Image (cartoon, helix red, strand yellow):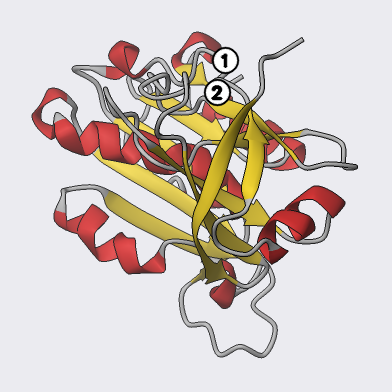
Amino acid sequence: MPDWHSGVVTSRSPAADGLTDLVLDIQGTPLEGTHLHPGQYVRLSLPGLQASLFAIASAPEPHGTRWEFLLKDGSPLPDALIRLPLGAKVQVTAPEGAGFPLERARGHDVLLFATGSGISAIRPLIASVRRERDTFGRVKLYFGARTPTAFAYQGELHAWEGGDIQVVRTVSQPGASGWQGLTGYVQAHLGEESVQNARAFVCGQPDMVRGVLDALKERGVPREHIFFNY
């Protein structure tokens, strides 16, 4: 059984349609500094509700005292977390999983794939890449959402691009939104650039993951060069 500790809600704000950014303060608990690798996740729990896994959306910090999460509404626990007042306590465990093995991408081009709330696991990876940007070749994020208003962290995209990370956004259900950008699935927009020697990091729903795997395989990327955070 995991050990549970109390985190305190210090911030809560809309991140996109159907997505909310939640920040927990873990200062003074044994959890301080335990987030070591981008892509790690924790269990969150509230009384009377089943615990669930959530990726830590903030970057690992040696003495970190705050963890950020991206909550997707529509399920009992996320909905309850979203309604919590500031100062409320949430039960949280230590980070689990090995995270993304970023060290295996040094010296290579990097391909990042995320859809919807899956960007929560990729965001700390982006932060880690930016800290040692010269260590990698081309870095490209393929970011998909159902609608144009469903992209989380839109305010950070320019900073990512300013940090020499190319961002390719695509919308799968543009409808009558007037969206003028790319449409369809992320894996449909790999382009003609060589990717055989790239390292890929992927987070999204199972159908998306399978689609990306198939597309990368067709382009000659070995399975051992494609990484997940679980």
Front-lying residue, 18 or 13: 13
* Location of mark 2 (residue): 229
Compared with residue 117, is residue 200 higher up or lower down, i.e. above or below? above
Residue ID for mark 1: 97
Q: Is residue 143 left or right of residue 129?
A: right
Residue 55: percent from the left, percent from the top? 57, 35
Q: Quadrant of the C terminus?
A: top right
Task: Answer with the quarter of the image where residue 47 lies.
Answer: top right
Q: Is residue 145 left or right of residue 82?
A: left
Residue plotted at (50% across, 36% down): 56
Q: Is residue 158 among the parts visible in the rendering? A: yes
Picture quadrant where residue 102 is located: top left
Give the residue displayed 28% in from the left and 39% down from the top. 127
Indicate the amino acid at tag 2: Asn
Q: Three-letter amino acid code at disc 1?
A: Gly
- Residue 147, compared with residue 73, is above or below; it is below
Callout 2: helix, strand or loop? loop
Residue most toward the right? 48
Residue positioned 53% across, 29% down in the render = 216
Do labels 1 and 2 touch, CB within 8 Å? Answer: yes
Crowding near pointer 2: few (<14 within 10 Å), some, many (20+)?
A: many
